[in-house]
Image (cartoon, rainbow, N blue to C red):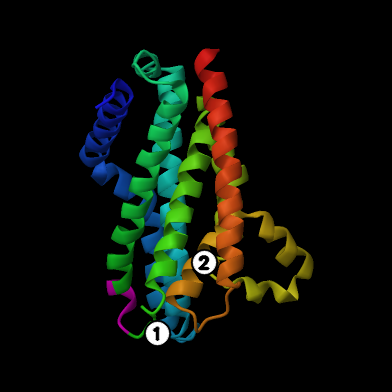
Amino acid sequence: MSSTTQAFSALFARDVHVARRNIVTTVLQTMLQPLLFVFVFGQVMTRSGMMPASYKGMLLPGIMAISMTMTGVMTVAMPLIAEFQFTREIEDRLLAPIRIEWIAVEKMLSGVLQALVSGAIVAIPARLLLGSDLHLSMEHLGMFFLVASLIALFSAAGGLTLGCSVGQTQIGLIFSMVLAPMIMFGCAYYPWKALESFPILQKLVLLNPLVYASEGLRGTLAPTYPHISTPIIVAVLAVVDVVLMVVAMQRFRSKAVS
């Protein structure tokens, strides 16, 4: 085994160990809000008759998309901000016998794994809260796993870019000015087609990658509900992933050598 492979494996094993140790905190930070939305919109609103029961099946894929995206972003960006600005732990990693780019790849791989686990974990309690009549389909599992992998990579690469671009004092601004609008206009709680009454907004939200994450999971898990074509979703997410990975690698290298 080469020194690069050994160093990469050791760094990845350490991040997995840290993620396992902080699993409770991570769950509370990234999954509590989506599950509260599931309960309020999927149970309270439907049982009271204010929303149709069919809304529950449309909601679940969107909740999974939010959970995966937020987990990938938070678990990569937050530790990276601390490592660069406070603990300086990144200096130890940079001393490893490995190219700087491989450290960035390891960070993204760790984020991808945690995002996939997050999507699986949040789906279980959400499924229990919503009940059995969700009209979900298992006929497109291959495409579902492809879309889920692209979403996880997008969230991890986005987290790496964010972690190398903002400071500790800017985190609150990022949440209020970027992540919150991204979630509300990410078509997680409604299909993209529902914005037809707002044609300008419907076109603008296509700049939001979360739209494709929500619509992609909806198209593979609940294809009976309105959704953007899955091949288009896959193509757009693949382009977003490539762009974010290139930007993230460049930002990470620039930050590391500065």
Residue under pointer 2: 216
Q: Are marks 2 and 1 in contact (CB under 8 Å)?
A: no
User: Quick one: SS at disc 1?
Assistant: loop
* Residue farthest front in this picture: 1
Q: Which residues are magenta?
A: 128-132
Can residue 8 be seen here? yes
Q: Residues within 10 Å of mark 2 (few under 14, many from 20)?
A: many
Nearest to the observer: residue 87 or residue 246: 246
Is label 2 or label 1 in front?
2
What's under tag 2, amino acid-wise?
A: Gly
Q: Is residue 130 magenta?
A: yes
Question: Within the image, what quadrant is residue 162 found in?
Answer: top right
Query: What residue would you read off at disc 1?
Result: 135
In the image: residue 127, left or right of residue 257: left
Query: Quick one: 239 or 207, which is closer to the camera?
Result: 239
Can residue 166 be seen in the rendering of this structure? no
List x then y, in percent, for residue 73.
46, 43
